[in-house]
Image (spheres, coloured by chain):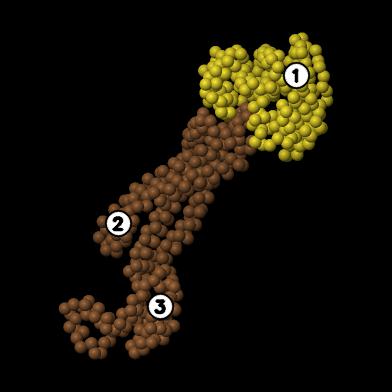
Chain colours: A yellow, B brown
Amino acid sequence: MISLVGVDLVYENGTKALNKIDIEISKGEFVFIVGSSGAGKSSILKLLLRESKATRGVVRVNGFNLSSIRSKKISQFRRTLGVVFQDFRLIPTLNIFENVAFALRVIGEKQKNIKQKVPKILKELGILHKIKAMPSQLSGGEQQRVALARALINDPSIIIADEPTGNIDPELSEDIVELLKKINLKGTTVVMVTHEHELVHYFGGRVLNIDKGLVVSDSYIGGKNEIK
Amino acid sequence: MKSNSFFYLIVQGARNLWMHSLMTMASIAVLTTCLLLVGFAILFTINVNNMVSHVEKQNEVVVFIKDGTSQIEMEEIGNFLKQHQLIDKIDFISKEKALKIEKDRLGDEAILLEGLDKDNPLPASFSIVVSDLEEIESVVVDIEQFKYVEKINVSTQVTDTLILIRQIVQSSGGAVVIALLIVSLVIIANTIRSSVFTRRREISIMKYVGATNSFIRLPFIIEGIFMGLLSAGIAFFITWGGYTAFISIVSTSTNTWIEGIATSLLYFKDIMFYILYSYIFSGVIIGTLGSGMSIKSHLKV
Ligand SMILES: Nc1ncnc2c1ncn2[C@@H]1O[C@H](COP(=O)(O)OP(=O)(O)O)[C@@H](O)[C@H]1O
Ligand SMILES: [Mg+2]
């Protein structure tokens, strides 16, 4: 499902963000990626999204070899993923319905299907009542649910989340991870970056620890509310 | 392309224009000015060409032959003129014919020429039409070689002036137009760049959810094309109004010289499609190139 073999990532300015990384993630796993700021966590996600290209080594995701993928195929590849970020990245001028519909419109989905799918996913994530609201009228937790709805609308087989709880009150952070867990139980692979150790220890599971561009540990830890 | 995508892209392209209407207006103003200058150059050239060809038809070169030139020599120069590549038409006017023309011209006063029949002072001549006005000088030089040529009458002053003006307008006008085209390109590219910048969040989301490159880029190309079309439309109506006003002012002039020019000007309806197509063509090309340039450097996917 996800495999990084001997991967280096050197940015254009010469910064070496990742150094000979090896990671294997199977279908249906839930993986936390932790590490201090600047360790290279987001860089790993950028590789998985093919936002960055590995300087060395091979990255494979969902059957695509991202080291040799042609640029024409990248859009097709990305439709198999869903992404959420710390800053939600909703479009402030569009209401909640349109923000989620956006992900379908830009890949040419029919209006009929859009009208069907969007309310359905908003209902699943418990924010259907905000369908006509603007993003600015929502709390951080609600905005992240909308972002998650947008990420899920195309039925991705992997969800990639970069510090999804970073801008959310700690009490509500657990709700977001609960949602991710629910999604994961339906078979979607989840890769979540976080630096909130309490959260990791609360849920437990597979934890990849990154430091200075290296995987320093890859282990399962038990949690109060364990995943898997 | 699916029709729902098509409408989405058109709407996005138009929305882009609105989102920074000030920059859009500036771009359209510059592009319109540029097109107007192109239009001016075209109108000017077409009209001057028209006048030149008008004058060209009337304007002949007359080669006077010295008295006492033998028949053989006369035929020699006649053949030379006939075979000359740059000479379209040739008319021989004998001494007798010249006298008759002069008598006819004088009419009642022809009596003054009475008695000249025996000792005709008028020279024989060849009246020729040179195919290309700009070649007159070289034709004259060719003819001057014949020693029995008395003199050559060329009244090319008007055409010379017209040709000179045309050359000046075409070369300096060309430089100004090229400079303005470059300015238009840069301004449009900048407008699109700012459009890309204001929409960078949407663009990044589009990438993440798997919109294709062309889908992401098309609204900006459409924005550029819209700017080109709008400029073309505005420039066309300004040209229409301006040219029509110019003609009506010129044709009511009491100055005979200006009146003369007015009669040889073309009507707008005769050239409007030519102007319109040139505007649309240049506008769309510049709009597409400008946005294309911008996207290439600012919209990496
Ligand atoms: N686009 C970039 N260009 C250059 N250096 C970058 C870029 N993105 C990240 N870096 C650098 O790479 C290293 C790892 O960054 P990142 O993966 O964002 O860390 P993390 O997400 O773990 O905080 C840092 O030193 C960061 O400054
Ligand atoms: Mg990060």
Q: Name the residue under label 1.
A: A29
Q: Distance between the residues labelled 3 and 2?
A: 41 Å
Q: Name the residue under label 2.
A: B250
Disc 1: residue Cβ within 8 A of ligand 1's nearest atom: no
The mark nearer the N terminus, 3 or 2, is: 3
The picture places residue B199, in percent across and down from the top left corner, at 56, 32
Give the residue drawn at x 37%, y 84%: B74
- Which amino acid type is marked by label 2? Val
State left or right for residue B10 relative to residue B130: right
The picture places residue B72, in percent across and down from the top left corner, at 38, 87
> Is the residue B285 above or below the residue A87 in the image?
below
Same chain for mark 1 and mark 3? The answer is no
Quarter of the image with the N terminus of chain B in it: top right
Q: Mark 3 points at which residue?
A: B81
> Is the residue B224 above or below the residue A127 in the image?
below
Q: Quadrant of residue A174?
A: top right
Question: Mark 3 or 2, which is nearer the eye?
Answer: 3
Q: Under tag 2, what secondary structure?
A: helix
Q: How far apart are marks 1 and 3 (CA)?
A: 98 Å
